[in-house]
Image (spheres, rainbow, N blue to C red):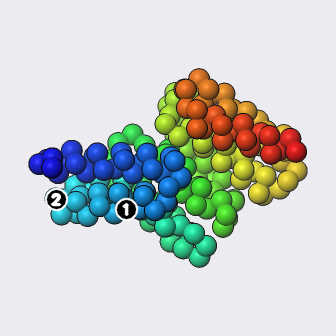
Amino acid sequence: MLDHPNSLAHGLHNVGIGYQLGGDREATYAVAHRAAALAEKFALPPWRASSLILAGWATASGAGAADAVRLIDAEIATAAGPLPQYYLGLAAEVLLSAGPADALGHLDRAIAGIDEAGIGIYLPEIYRLRGACLLALDRGNKTEARSAFATAAEIAKRQGAVIFERRAQASLSELAQ
């Protein structure tokens, strides 16, 4: 076993991100919980916060969605690395089912925080989720939603982010039907 808690917490957190990107809530939670416990034991606040955010996403459903978003929002400032847009995107994804208006606010904050257009690990998904929020708020927002989905697909293609490109194309196809 690696005998460097910071590196181990970092690695576990990255594995958790991989599971989250693949949509595996159970695996995300297991790894995030382990990373958060390690970070707590060795006083590594950024890794603790980042891992709690992933755990919040993994456990969010139904009535627990509001609690998960509060946890994510509370930990974003302390979280490790240059991923605040990713974490805002996770919060928005959780909120989408419960309160699309609040989700839209998180996504708009994420987009406003982008320093360089088209750059960001979760940017295609943020635009795709924005389109979904717009439709959830009003089915009449089809033109703006289509634009968000197309932007998501374009950025994902440029980034080589195949999973995000497919999700954006699926959203465009669903909208066309």
25 or 125: which is nearer to us? 25
> Which label lies toward us, 1 or 2?
1
116 or 22: which is nearer to us? 22
Instruction: Decide which of tag 1 and tag 2 comes sooner along the chain.
Output: 1
Q: Is residue 3 above or below residue 136?
A: above
Q: CA distance from mark 1 to mark 2?
A: 19 Å
18 or 56: which is nearer to us? 18
- Which residue lies most toward the bottom here? 63
Amino acid beneath label 2: Phe
Amino acid beneath label 1: Ala
Per the image, label 2 sits on a secondary structure element best described as: loop
The residue to which callout 2 is attached is 42
In the picture, the disc for residue 30 is 1
Q: Position of residue 21 (x, y in %)?
A: 50, 46
In the picture, the disc for residue 80 is none
Q: Position of residue 167 (x, y in %)?
A: 66, 41
